[in-house]
Amino acid sequence: MNKHKIRSLKVCVNSGLRQYSLCCPPQPPRCGCPPQIPGFGRRIVPPSDCRPGPVPPNPCVPKFPGKDGWRKYRSLFFFIGVPLIIVQAIHSLGHELPPKGECRDYEYMRRRTKRFPWGKRGIKSLFHNPHVNHLPGECEPPPLDCD
């Protein structure tokens, strides 16, 4: 090793920071740290030069754009989402529901082979809307086809 490398190694070890190349994990310190053997009563403490210092941030990890990303989405919700919901609610309140259309009672429509377990008579489906849907028996029969 040349003198410059030896000097930089001493500086790194003495300052507590270890240098490592980009995109490579840090290497363990190159000093004679005694191994710690479990089971002995006395704890073996390595010399102060061998203790690893703080590891610098890895330059290969992508940078996080910011800690306060939630603020952007909170602002979008309150300044764009909530006003749009209010405008749509006001718009829909201004419209009236159309009247129920006429109904023809064909044999393949509104068939009930057994009763539903809810309601008084059990003829309303779970998603029955009385403003739009007709019940069996409310419709007039289709015209007779005499051809």
Image (spheres, rainbow, N blue to C red):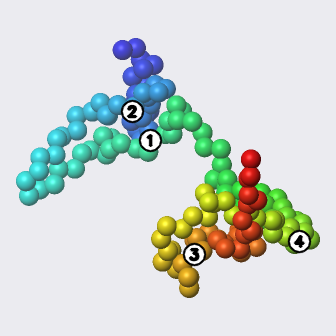
Tag nearer the camera, 1 or 3: 3
**Dot 1 amino acid type:** Val
Tag nearer the camera, 4 or 2: 4
Q: CA distance from mark 4 to mark 3?
A: 27 Å
The percent coordinates of residue 107 (x first, y second) are 62, 60
Q: Are marks 1 and 4 in contact (CB under 8 Å)?
A: no
- Choose between 63 and 9: the one closer to the eye: 63
> Which label number is shown at residue 55?
1
View extreme (front): residue:
147
Judging by the rendered image, the residue that carries numbered circle 2 is 26
Q: CA distance from mark 1 to mark 2?
A: 8 Å
View extreme (top): residue:
2
Q: Residue at x 72, y 65 (%)?
A: 141
Judging by the rendered image, the residue that carries numbered circle 4 is 96
View extreme (right): residue:
94
Quadrant of the image occupied by residue 33: top left
- Choose between 144 and 89: the one closer to the eye: 144
Query: Is residue 52 found left or right of 147 in the rendered image?
Result: left
Identify the mark nearer the N-term, 3 or 2: 2
Judging by the rendered image, the residue that carries numbered circle 3 is 123
Q: Are marks 4 and 3 in contact (CB under 8 Å)?
A: no
Is residue 128 among the parts visible in the rendering?
yes
Q: Residue at x 81, y 65 (%)?
A: 101
Identify the mark nearer the N-term, 1 or 4: 1
Relative to 86, is 20 above or below?
above
Q: Residue at x 45, y 19 (%)?
A: 4
Q: Are marks 1 and 3 in contact (CB under 8 Å)?
A: no
Q: Residues within 10 Å of mark 4 (few under 14, many from 20)?
A: few
